[in-house]
Amino acid sequence: MSADRSALQRTIERGEENGGSIEFKQRLSRDVHLADGRMESLAAQLRHRVLSGDGEATYAVGVTDDGGIAGISPDEFSETMDVLSRLAEEASAHVYDVETWSAGEHDRGLVGIATIREGSMIEADDDHIVVGTAGHVDHGKSTLIGTLVTGQADDGEGGTRSYLDVQPHEVERGLSADLSYAVYGFDADGPVRMDNPDRKSDRAQVVEEADRLVSFVDTVGHEPWLRTTIRGLVGQKLDYGLLVVAADDGPTKTTREHLGILLATDLPTVVAITKTDAVSSDRVMEVGREVEALLREVGETPLPTQRHGLETAVDELVDGDVVPIIRTSAVAKTGIEQLDRLFESLPKRATTDRETFRMYIDRTYDVKGVGAVASGTVNSGTIEAGDELLAGPMPDGTFQEVEARSIEMHYHRVDKASAGRIVGIALKGIEEDRLDRGMVLLPREANPEPVREFEAEVMVLNHPTRITDGYEPVVHLETASEAAAFYPEEGRLLPGDAGRATVQFKFRPYLVEEGQRFVFREGSSKGVGTVTDINWPSSANSYQWRGDLLQNQAC
């Protein structure tokens, strides 16, 4: 909800004029305003407003015909936005942006402004790639991405990183504590960046104008938030990884851990040596040699771009076990042009054979005037506004029917989104507190079976002793992070061992399928695995499990 009411005040002061671009609507309802005859009339009115405003109209909602602030309930506001979207679609336009305010004291509801623009909502390009960043805390991940997406040199204090952080305390402390997102793109003239990253409309404009998009999922470098980093690298549908190593610090234990996760999930990875402006050229070369040695230790071939060229790096990264290394500085903008050319050239990689829509939920929001919003990366298929979906599984294993009210991608409303897009989906038919990270959105006609137990091929990367029956790490699978019990086929697994194991979620079920990769960790112990088979419960076992679950919840 916007705090600054100046836009609302200006709209009301300008008033609703014949032949103008402003329209006041107290409320729109499906039953009345989408009825035969009325819909066509209102769509024609909307079209007139848009043309009068040279392609843009403003609708004040919760406002009477004479400009009085009436206010409507959140449910009524959501229904009004649904109807307005239908009218805009009928008039070859779309709802570009919505701002809401409290109508006044004593819970008088909401008042808002909807910006309507000519033309249908865009569909993102098919070559849209998603890049996940990783690396030690304070090695410059967020600062480098901030410089990439804005084209602005950093001030030496990490100023450009503020364009990514989503929590006030992150900006204050200079440390990321959750996943952040950023986007830029390319057209025939080169990079398309944000002019003013503090305006969410600038991100939307990048999505609208670019012919090719690059989205970044910026993870967390601080050790206590390793689970969040794993969630970013495992739970998003990434095409490539970007590992940063600061020239003033060099590779660390966290660098090794993050590299291991990137490679264990089969993610083609690029290394950026950052902060090269802060040290001597000899130190940059020394860190370069350390990075090359680290990559060779894990069976990868380092490819420094200053020696082998960027074109070779692009070809080899896609085709083989090669890790390009690029020297960068967000302050001096060293290597930024190289990274631009790299991301412009890299092909879309993350694909799936599944044609139906699926999205694992990563975050949820309760947006005033909109309702429940679930965000994440589309795993497969295509989602369109108005699609009927299932959300779940709930703790009892059931799924709830919902509807995709609208879709946003980096603050830009789109009419549909396909695999690889990072989106927020406004959902009708469910409260936000019913949604949890790790749940999935599916088509209504799907017949999903919640899973509590599966078989897997696992490899123990690090463990102080041995893994035996009943070992309980946290399993990171898609966006789910859940305690699970391991039962190795041979009764035990030692560090470096690979073998089969039965994995049982401890508290609730998830949607799991063969072939999914996962990471498990407990303290300093870490490992990776691949789902090989699903253990479907009998109805009796399922009933018993649900009874156990409810008992556990009551304790």
Image: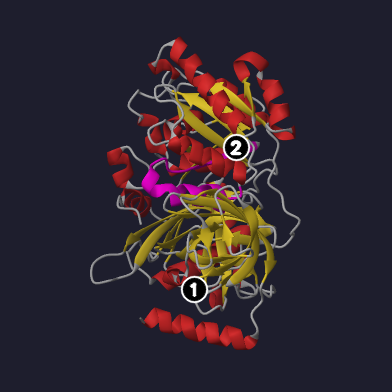
Compare residues 336 and 90 and report the one nearer the observer. Answer: 336
Residue drawn at x 39%, y 63% is 368
Q: Residue 209 carries which label?
A: 2
Image vertical order of residue 110 relative to residue 48, above or below = below
Give neighbour class at mark 1: few <14, some 14-19, many 20+ (Cα, 10 Å): some
Residue 391, by quadrant, is bottom right
The label nearer to you, 2 versus 1, is 1
Specify the quadrant that holds the N terminus.
bottom left
Image quarter (top left, top right, bottom left or bottom right) of the C terminus: bottom left
Residue occupying image coordinates x 57% and y 72%: 452
Q: Residue at x 48, y 16 (%)?
A: 286
Q: In the rendering, at what x and y percent does residue 269 appear?
A: 61, 35
Residue at image mark 1? 430
Residue type at mark 1 is Ile
For residue 281, side relative to residue 357 (left or right)? left
Q: Can residue 75 be seen in this view?
A: yes
Per the rendered image, the range of residues in magenta is 212-237
Q: In this view, does 43 lie above or below 249?
A: below
- List x then y, in percent, for residue 219: 46, 43
The picture places residue 532, in percent across and down from the top left corner, at 69, 62
Near mark 2 (Cα within 10 A), the count class, few <14, some 14-19 or many ≥20, is some
Of residues 99 and 171, which is closer to you in this image?
171
| Image side of residue 230 versus residue 168, left or right | right
Hey, what amino acid is under mark 2? Glu
Q: Earlier in the sequence, mark 2 or mark 1?
A: 2
